[in-house]
Image (cartoon, rainbow, N blue to C red):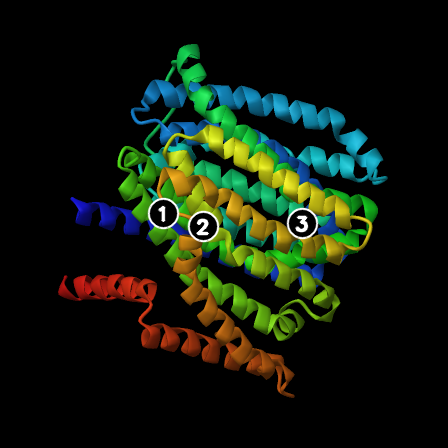
Amino acid sequence: MDNINNKKIFSSFFWRFAERCGAQGVAFIVSIILARILSPEDYGTIALVTVFTTILNVFVDSGMGNALIQKKNADDLDFSTVFYFNIIVCILLYLSIFIISPVIASFYKRPDLTVVIRVLSLTLIVSGIKNVQQAYVSRNMLFQRFFFATLSGTVGAAIVGITMASLGFGVWALVGQQLFNIVIDTTILWFTVKWYPKRMFSLKRLRGLFQFGWKILISSLINTIYENLRTLIIGKVYSSSDLAYYNQGNKFPYVIVVNINSSIDSVLLPTMSAEQEHKEKVKNMTRKAIKISTYLMAPAMMGLVAISVPMVTLVLTDKWLPCIPFLRVFCITYMFYPIHTANLNAINALGRSDLFLKLEIVKKVIGIIALFSTIWISVKAMAYSLLIVSFLSQIVNSWPNKYLLNYSYFEQLKDILPSISLALVMSVGIYPISFLHLPNIVILMIQIILGVSIYLGGSKILKLDSFQYLWKIIKSMFVKRGSV
């Protein structure tokens, strides 16, 4: 039984990871092309507008969807009820942002923002149609469906965005890219997932789901507003270019993080929820998730820190060099994300959304204090404060599991220390190559090849269990394919 479960878990992770890598890989390449065509000011404008749609999307993407995944015996009545509820909420949200968009534009003294906000916010309505399908896929671990839907939308959006940018549409190229992506993604998912809303609705079921979901919703809303608060403040206090450099610095490490972290995150919650009555199993899953995620994340983040100068110069051109300090800060911050993700998923899987909400409030109080302590110093100071907040947030997120799972923060640090130490050694080893007087492409190739060699070689010499676990799975996959 355990073998079957392990196969399903790894298969689900594989498809989710493939979907994330494919989509983010294409999106990343497109963002590079667009960054070379468009100005930092265009990127600053879309970054500012996207904050508002991202915050409103929390009402669609969080809470009720997670409640459907977590509920043990969710049926068609539950799914249909949430579907119709989401549609109504999304329409109301769109009407709200449509009405207040001139106020937002006036606050930022950018009249052009009004129409951009109104058009880009159409993604809210599409998200409402897509959300329950996503929950169904996640609950049943049918992540292969995500792969085809997401990749098709991303590739189509890439063509639309690059074409519009080349024709001189400026910021509208980014708007068109986002709209096309979500419409195609949703359409394909709608036709490939074998679930459709029935003509049924239950206020009683809605209230039951809401009892769990509202805490997740509030937690996600607090987190999303907090995560985007820096963007809102930079857009108001500083220039669009400053905002663009800050966001561009986040983009490179985020591509890697979203592939690894969200893939594990998507598989972890439904898997843990199925075992919520067996705390020892949940602890083992949490521990394995933290160790494997960090083993993959640490070298990627530390490697990115080491290669940042030649990479940005080669890929984005010299006009984007000011984004490098921000890139390095985000890399260090994201390296510890597995601790956040695995701990919070364990808490949710055990049905303790009340704790989840309390943790979010504590972390955000810490973050806001750090933010407002640096807001008038500089954008860099605001970014550096993230390092302190990240460290304190790790302790906060892991604290409940010291008692719920008997898995303390110090045990977690002990589990990830080998991977992080090896990643640091690798980063220090390849960083000096940046100073060689060679073409940037040659420097990058040397750094990447040497970095991978150091990390994998060190993993084998030190016999890291995460390396051995992943290597065993990879070998078994090739053996099975060879025997077919």
Residue 373 percent coordinates (x, y): 76, 47
Q: Mark 3 or mark 1: which comes first in sequence? A: 3
Placement of 395 over or under 441, stated as above or below: above
State the SS at label 2. helix
The answer to whether residue 81 is seen in the rendering is yes
The residue shown at (72%, 58%) is: 245
Q: Nearer the viewer, residue 473 or 418?
A: 418
The amino acid type, in three-letter code, at marker 3 is: Ala
Number of dots carrying numbers: 3
The residue shown at (59%, 23%) is: 91
**Quadrant in which residue 141 is drawn:** top left
Label placed on residue 173: 3
Q: Nearer the viewer, residue 76 or 158?
A: 76
Q: Nearer the viewer, mark 2 or mark 3?
A: 2
Marks 2 and 3, how far apart at CA:
45 Å
Residue 319 percent coordinates (x, y): 75, 67
Which residue is labeled 1 in the image?
286
Residue 218 percent coordinates (x, y): 56, 29
Marks 3 and 1, how far apart at CA:
41 Å
Q: Is residue 144 left or right of residue 395?
A: left
Farthest left residue in view = 483
Which residue is labeled 2 in the image?
409
Q: Which quadrant is home to the C terminus?
A: bottom left
Q: Is residue 9 left or right of residue 264?
A: left
Q: Mark 2 or mark 1: which comes first in sequence? A: 1
State the SS at label 1. helix
